[in-house]
Image: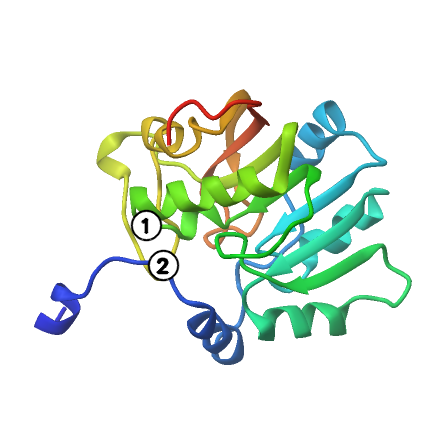
Amino acid sequence: MDDAQAMSPVRSLTAREWDHTYASLPAHWDEEPHPVLGELLAAYAPPPQRVLEVGCGLGTTARWLADQAYTVTACDFSARAVAEARRRTAPKTAVRYEVADITGPGRPDVFPVVLDRGVLHTCPTDRERRAFAAGMARVCGPGGLWLHVGAAALAPESALDQTNGPSWTTEETFLRAVSPWFTVVHQRIADFGRRAGITDWPARYAVLRRQSVVTDE
């Protein structure tokens, strides 16, 4: 690591940087969800439901949700990802795509169920994780559910802050980010995906309920 890299602030990638990533690299992480996500949806938010998927990428999870009889709005702040997701989606599929950043202004719609699969874990600092959780609270109605899937550190020494990959969070770090707005209803650890050596790392599967009153911002 050179001096410039060492002095650069740790941060998540911008929309423009994600556009470049999708244009220049194969999305090795892109695959249909692990069966655990289907189990949690069936138990806590069975279809039909309106679901907002945040950080939809190439639309693989959004199309999978539509196949499970959910009505899906899928958003990403990468215009390139959204364009490719639209291209890959059959015309009559129950998915509506938007270019949107839930941490910014706008996005007035509120959904009973919101989902992020591999988005919170791209936030490498407490400040960015809290900003993302606050954004999820804005789009999730009081009493609504947030289903989260993200990289999990099984011990403090395995926690990493990364800008070009998942930020592995301990349970303490995760709860510190979400607790002002959400209560954890269910949590378990399982593989993120099913590709050996690529996506079969430990992930936190959490079901969170939106609080009616913010406890502490």
Q: Where is residue 92 in the image (x, y as percent from the top left)?
A: 91, 62
Q: What residue type is disc 2 on?
A: Ser
When the figure is inspected, residue 132 is found, relative to residue 90, above or below; the finding is above
- Whether residue 88 sits left or right of residue 164 in the image: it is right
Badge 2 crowding class, 10 Å Cα cut-off, few under 14, some 14 to 19, many 20 or more, is many
Q: Nearer the viewer, residue 76 or 192?
A: 76
In this figure, which residue is indicated by the disc labeled 2?
12
Q: Position of residue 130 (x, y in %)?
A: 39, 40
Q: What residue type is disc 1 on?
A: Pro
Q: Quadrant of residue 114?
A: top right
Q: Residue 104 carries which label?
A: none
Q: Which residue is drawn at 51% across and 45% down?
A: 135
Q: Give the structural element (helix, strand or loop) at label 2.
A: loop
Q: Residue at x 56, y 46 (%)?
A: 117
Q: Nearer the viewer, residue 157 or 208?
A: 208
Q: Which of marks 1 and 2 is nearer the N terminus?
A: 2
Tell me if label 1 and label 2 are in contact, CB under 8 Å.
yes
Q: Residue at x 77, y 50 (%)?
A: 72
Q: Which of 18 and 204 is in front in this view?
A: 18
Q: In which quarter of the image is residue 144?
A: top right
The C terminus sits in image quarter: top left
When the figure is inspected, residue 106 is found, relative to residue 114, above or below; the finding is below
In this figure, which residue is indicated by the disc labeled 1?
124
Mark-to-mark CA distance, 1 and 2: 6 Å
Badge 1 crowding class, 10 Å Cα cut-off, few under 14, some 14 to 19, many 20 or more, is many
Q: How is the image coloured?
A: rainbow
The N terminus sits in image quarter: bottom left
